[in-house]
Amino acid sequence: MALISIDSALQRICRDMRKITIGQGIEILSYKRNRGVAVMRVQEDKYIVSERGYQEEKWQMNGKELSKLLKTLFKREFPRSRKVRMYHLSGIHEMERERKKL
């Protein structure tokens, strides 16, 4: 997918996560693709969030907590970014896949 504004990314992710099927997800990467956040839907209202970049962590949470955590992660992983890359993931195996770096 193309580059999107970081200001609209959080709203777009929360909207898309309600629409995608269980087992799919979204990955948000910096322009250089060296830092990122991946969100995978595992149950109706349960998500796995994985952070790769300055810190390496994973969380499991419900939909209400997702927006607050993503906002915190965006500030930590993309502090000076104005544009981010957004990819759709078709399965959990794509969550850990290395992306080509610029």
Image (cartoon, grey):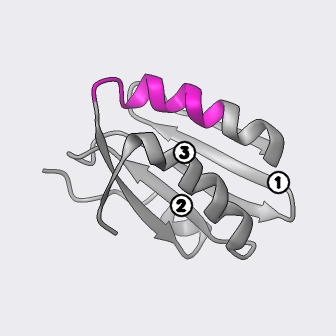
Label located before the other in sequence (2 or 3): 3
Give how far across and how far down residue 18 sits, in percent.
73, 64
**Residue at numbered disc 1:** 46
7 w.r.t. 55: above or below = below
Q: Amino acid at mark 2?
A: Ile
Question: What residue is at 55 percent from the left and 56 percent from the top?
Answer: 12
Q: Amino acid at mark 3?
A: Leu
Q: Is residue 41 left or right of residue 82?
A: right
Depth check: 43 or 12 in front? 12
Of the 4 image quadrants, the one containing the N terminus is bottom left
Number of marks drawn:
3
Q: Which mark is residue 30?
A: none
Label located before the other in sequence (3 or 1): 3
Instruction: Label 3, secondary structure: give it.
Output: helix
**Residue at numbered disc 3:** 10
Q: Would residue 62 be seen by someone viewing this image from the given angle?
A: no
Question: What residue is at 68 percent from the left and 31 percent from the top?
Answer: 68
65 w.r.t. 63: above or below = above
Q: Amino acid at mark 1?
A: Lys
**Residue at numbered disc 2:** 26
- Cα gap from disc 2 to disc 1, whole angstroms: 14 Å
